[in-house]
Amino acid sequence: MNKGKYVFAQIMEFAPFYDFDQCVKRYRGHHYIKSFTCWQQFLSMAFGQLAYRESLRDVVVCLRAQKTKLYHSGFSSLPAKTTLARANEKRDWRIYRDFAQILIQEARRLYLDDTVFNLDLDSTCYVLDATTIELCFSVFQWARYFETKAAVRLHTLMDLKGNIPAFFRITTAKTHEVNMLDIINLEVGAYYVMDRGFLSFERLFKIHTAGSFFVIRAKKNLRIKRLYSNKVDKTTGVRCDQVIISSHRYGLKKYPDKLRRIKYFDKETKRSYVYLTNDFNIEAKTVADLYKNRWQIEIFFKWIKQHLKIKAFWGYSANAVKTQICIAICAYLMVAIIKKKLNIDRNLYEILQILSVSLFDKIPINTLLSEVSIQNLAEHNQEPLFPLGF
């Protein structure tokens, strides 16, 4: 398989060029462009992500060191730092956002029957959350959200089947995460798991009337009226299972229907949690397990920040920052697609470590990822994330 091709070229074969070209045409990405195409920009930035480069200069220097191999790796020319920087500043970042959405669809299709998420639910389960990526205030003043701080916020809707982001949006840090409930397309019968920062009765009722379900952690100052209680098996950790309504006039106006309130004691953390849901049929313990799986998105955010280069940005404009984040997500998705299509029995951390030092080797990628051993992951001072095979 792919005998004689460089590893980087083999990776890029998993990025559908026709779909990428359609994204470029949609936003006129090649308007007034003579030689350095959007695809060349994508290759350069993706190389920087996969090779763990620290800056644009670092990317260009490494590519120049391998200039005899660039043509057969997909590069039509050797990129200059100023050309790459200008492309990041000027070319519409939505090209790479739309391409990431295409890769998301492919990855979700591949992980549809993933067995890692094994709750007995027939419906799709999503986790909605956001993470803040801090920026240097003196450089990124367009992203100001405190007097001396700047940041952007990455909002993500993750499908728990395979931990694949089904939706993402990049905003300034001033945009509250709850606003994403006004944007996402609600899927009938699906579950949406959220932290208490998303507790908005008006938006929760929108989920309810759309025929979807939510599981959300309740706030401590929530004013409720208990209608009746269901029997519970306290050996499972469930302390109470109640049917409630809001006792606050404003809350009752925004959510005029009944809610289910579940209190659960987690033996691992020695803490009690209170959840709200509009599903009255599933087991109370399943509700607690659903919320427990919310931490998969925290692992995703941690993984993205640690292993893909979005902590040190390679451009100063909003367009350059969003371009880099979108291409980082594309790199994540391509590795996830490779893992599933080639049936690689490694987690993504190990796969990226192997690829980062092998991009210009001529070896079939399935042989590389299946047979090469990592002698000591502790040398990188990181424990493997996604320990359940992802």
Image (cartoon, rainbow, N blue to C red):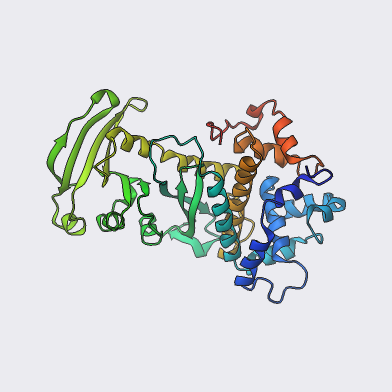
Front residue (pair 114, 275): 114
Q: Residue furthest right?
A: 68
Picture quarter with the C terminus: top right
Task: Residue 226: give x, y in percent of width and height.
Answer: 13, 42
Task: Residue 260: give x, y in percent of width and height.
Answer: 22, 43
Asked if residue 115 is positioned above or below residue 59 in the image, the reply reads above
Front residue (pair 80, 160): 160
Q: Quadrant of residue 94?
A: bottom right
Q: Residue furthest bottom?
A: 32
Residue depicted at 53% across the width and 43% down the height: 111
Instruction: Give the mark count.
Output: 0
Task: Residue 103: give x, y in percent of width and height.
Answer: 59, 54
Side of 161 where 245 appears, left or right: left
- Mark yes or no: residue 317 visible: no
Front residue (pair 137, 87): 87
Task: Residue 119: give x, y in percent of width and height.
Answer: 40, 35
Front residue (pair 187, 139): 187
Side of 340 where 73 appears, left or right: right
Picture quarter with the N terminus: top right
Residue depicted at 46% across the width and 36% down the height: 117
Residue depicted at 27% across the width and 45% down the height: 279
Side of 42 where 152 appears, left or right: left
- Mark yes or no: residue 187 visible: yes
Side of 299 where 293 appears, left or right: left
